[in-house]
Amino acid sequence: MIKEFINPPALPNWEQTFSQIVIVSHDSANTVYISGQVSVDENQNLVGEGDLKAQALRAFQNLEIALTAAAAKTTDVVRLNIYIKSYEPENAGPVGEALRRYFPEKNLPASTWLGVQSLAKEGFLIEVDAIAVVST
């Protein structure tokens, strides 16, 4: 088993606290662990301040960038966790819309949506992490 740690330049560099991606290579597949993606650009600037839909779209865009860096696609994702600050039922619409934009397939990954009191930085409204499995 081999572990590879990746921090792609198209995503913000959080190396002081965590790796963006960890790939664990097995005999016939790689398991890809993607750290929580939030609505920031590669320079850690918040995108979509106060706008859950805009932040959800950017968080899923960052997830897709991470998957691509790991030679994976959204169809390889088997587990998805979505954390929404101060979740209310009406938040499901904009988050679901962003999810379906990046996961248009019929078979979606197993997932959990959690309402949380806060996220890592002020202004973050959503965070998305994932696990993917890629055949080698």
Image: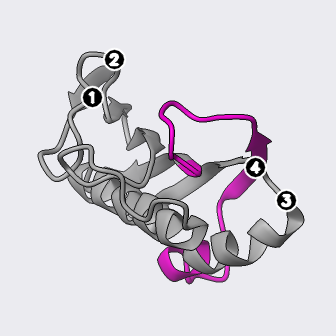
Whole-number angstrom distance, CA of label 4 to CA of label 2: 24 Å
Q: Residue at x 84, y 59 (%)?
A: 88
Segment tinted magenta in the rendering: 99-127
What is the CA distance from the residue labelled 3 to the residue labelled 2? 30 Å
The residue that label 2 is drawn on is 17
- Image check: 83 left or right of 9? right
Residue 7 in the image: above or below residue 90: above
Whichever of callouts 1 and 4 sits on the residue coming sooner in the sequence is 1
For badge 4, the amino acid type reads Thr
Provide the secondary structure element on which disc 4 rests: strand
Q: CA distance from mark 1 to mark 4?
A: 24 Å
**What residue is shown at x 54% (from left), y 61% (from top)?**
50
Q: Which residue is identified by label 1?
A: 14
Counting residues from the N terminus, which is met first, the one under dot 4 or under dot 2?
Answer: 2
CB atoms of marks 3 and 2 within 8 Å: no
N-term mark: 3 or 1: 1
